[in-house]
Image (cartoon, rainbow, N blue to C red):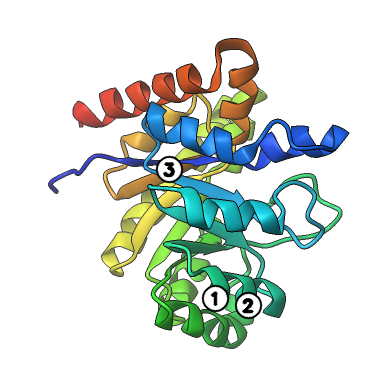
Amino acid sequence: MSLRKLRLGVNIDHVATVRNARGGDTPDPMRAALLAEVAGADGITAHLREDRRHITDSDIEALAKGLTVPLNFEMAATDEMQAIALRHTPHAVCIVPEKREERTTEGGLEVAREENKLAHFIAPLRDAGCRVSIFIAADQRQIEAAARIGAPVIELHTGAYCDAHANRRFEERDNEFEKLRDMAAFAADLGLEVHAGHGLTFDTVKPIVTLPEVQELNIGHFLIGEAIFSGLENAILRMRILIDEARAVI
């Protein structure tokens, strides 16, 4: 396999979280997105939640108009979010599960159980020219369902792998990595483009980068946290270097 440079999408949701904690206009997610571009981000990811807990409608409008790199619009499979996506037609939309009581996205989308609904939901988005991805666990049943509904891209949820590493459950971490490795290969064999994300850090990103089928990573919370200590550009630059170095030696 001839490996292309792995794309890095930077999620700016939690810049908006900090802004919203006090109200007002700062820190500005759009400014963070532009800094991320300069630092080497290949795209910007933003999740417009139904409760607008971080990113807002005006943020999406500003990003859609002001970015020079692609916008990846994360959203739940609701009529409201579909209408917003069709109004802005971002480069990409990523369909994610969403529960109002959760702190962050927990687990992947249940595609197999909602196959017919999701097939009809993503069709207008594809027709509008958006690249549609489905955020799912590293599970063969869900990957097969994603392929059947016509989603060209899946994003594998790396949260369980990262959580196991953070809690020093290394056997569990290795088992989760094996699932990600096997299911990335399985998805690619079905003709799907494979992305990965959720919880990735400087310590956990390199093994994921070594999976040759993975073409894009989406990383947010960790980078925004690191920005407090080293600055956003430096945090992204370091992540970019780690990614490029790991991919170069495959």
Amino acid type, callout 3: Leu
Q: Are marks 1 and 3 in contact (CB under 8 Å)?
A: no
How many other residues sit within 10 Å of disc 1, few (<14), some (14-19) or many (≥20)? some
Residue 83 is tagged as: 2
- Residue found farthest to the top: 229
Numbered disc in front, either 1 or 3: 1
Residue 179 visible in this rendered orientation of the protein = no
Amino acid type, callout 1: Leu
**Of label 1 and label 3, which has the lower sequence position?**
1
How many other residues sit within 10 Å of disc 2, few (<14), some (14-19) or many (≥20)? few
CA–CA distance in space, label 2 to label 1 = 5 Å
Residue 86 is tagged as: 1
- For the C terminus, the quadrant is top left
Which type of secondary structure does the marked residue at label 3 adopt? strand
Q: Are marks 2 and 1 in contact (CB under 8 Å)?
A: yes
Image position, residue 240 (x, y; %)? 37, 27
Q: Nearer the viewer, residue 63 or 194?
A: 63
Residue 161 is tagged as: none
Where residue 52 sits, quadrant-wise, is: bottom right
**Of label 3 and label 2, which has the lower sequence position?**
2
Q: Is residue 21 left or right of residue 158?
A: right
Q: Are marks 3 and 2 in contact (CB under 8 Å)?
A: no
Where residue 185 sits, quadrant-wise, is: bottom left
Amino acid type, callout 2: Ala
Q: What residue is drawn where x is 18% and y is 43%?
A: 3
Residue 120 visible in this rendered orientation of the protein = yes
Q: Nearer the viewer, residue 142 or 5?
A: 5
Q: Is residue 15 left or right of residue 120?
A: right
Residue that mark 3 sits on: 217
CA–CA distance in space, label 1 to label 3 = 24 Å
